[in-house]
Image (spheres, rainbow, N blue to C red):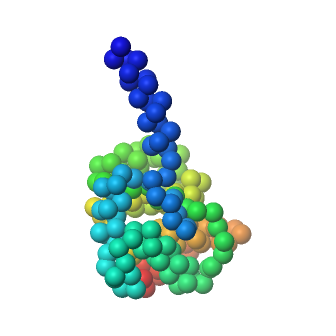
């Protein structure tokens, strides 16, 4: 009986957890309500949006500002933002991707946030994020989609760093 219940629960819970929990103009954000609230607080107060409480407007504002800083405004499919409530959970996500998306990276390094082009996804720890970091990862997404040929890693990093220091 217990096993049956578990299966039933999985049938109902899995499709729910797979969908985005918040959709904004430019992004699909995945995370619990608590994650989204922590995310909003971490981004606050970002100067032009000081009085705005809506996490969606803040995220879209940072996205538009990043596009503007890069001079790369072009229609693109929404990018996904996966939220993790702490460093451990983010690290588990990293371990799952390590052998595929992180091939060739220095495994000893613990990444604070990252973007994976093949998954169109930004990975964020809500306890360790700010507007600059989000803009930095968005810059990677924008640069990779804007240019017909993805730039070398070093070039992309210079552009992304420009954004986080100017946001
Ligand atoms: Zn970077």
> Which quadrant is the N terminus positioned in?
top left
- Nearer the observer, 149 or 113: 113
Q: Residue 125 location, x and y as percent?
A: 34, 58
- Nearer the observer, 130 or 149: 130
Describe residue 132's horizontal placement relative to residue 152 as left or right.
left
Task: Give the total of numbered labels.
Answer: 0
Residue 21 appearing in the image = yes
- Nearer the observer, 149 or 12: 12
Q: Residue at x 56, y 58 (%)?
A: 120
Q: Residue at x 42, y 83 (%)?
A: 167
Q: Residue 165 location, x and y as percent?
A: 40, 82
Q: Residue 104 location, x and y as percent?
A: 51, 53
Q: Residue 135 location, x and y as percent?
A: 45, 74
Q: Is residue 94 above or below residue 49?
A: above
Please tell me in which quadrant of the rendered image residue 38 appears.
bottom left
- Nearer the observer, 111 or 14: 14
Residue 161 appearing in the image = no
Q: Residue at x 55, y 84 (%)?
A: 68
Q: Is residue 133 above or below residue 87?
A: below
Q: Residue at x 61, y 67 (%)?
A: 144
Q: Residue furthest right?
A: 148
Describe residue 9's horizontal placement relative to residue 15 as left or right.
left
Please tell me in which quadrant of the rendered image residue 87 appears.
bottom left
């Amino acid at each position: 009986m217990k096993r049956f219940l578990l299966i039933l629960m999985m049938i109902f819970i899995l499709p729910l957890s797979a969908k985005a929990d918040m959709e904004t103009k430019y992004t699909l954000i995945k995370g619990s309500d608590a994650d989204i609230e922590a995310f909003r607080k971490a981004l606050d107060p970002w100067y032009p949006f000081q009085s705005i409480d809506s996490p969606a407007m803040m995220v879209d504002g940072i996205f538009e500002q990043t596009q503007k800083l890069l001079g790369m405004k072009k229609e693109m499919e929404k990018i996904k933002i996966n939220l993790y409530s702490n460093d451990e959970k983010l690290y588990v996500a990293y371990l799952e991707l390590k052998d595929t998306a992180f091939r060739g990276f220095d495994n000893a390094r613990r990444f604070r946030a990252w973007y994976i082009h093949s998954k169109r996804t930004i990975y964020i720890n809500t306890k360790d994020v700010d507007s600059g970091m989000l803009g930095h990862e968005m810059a990677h997404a924008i640069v990779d989609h804007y240019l017909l040929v993805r730039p070398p890693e070093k070039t992309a990093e210079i552009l992304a760093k420009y954004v986080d220091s100017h946001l």
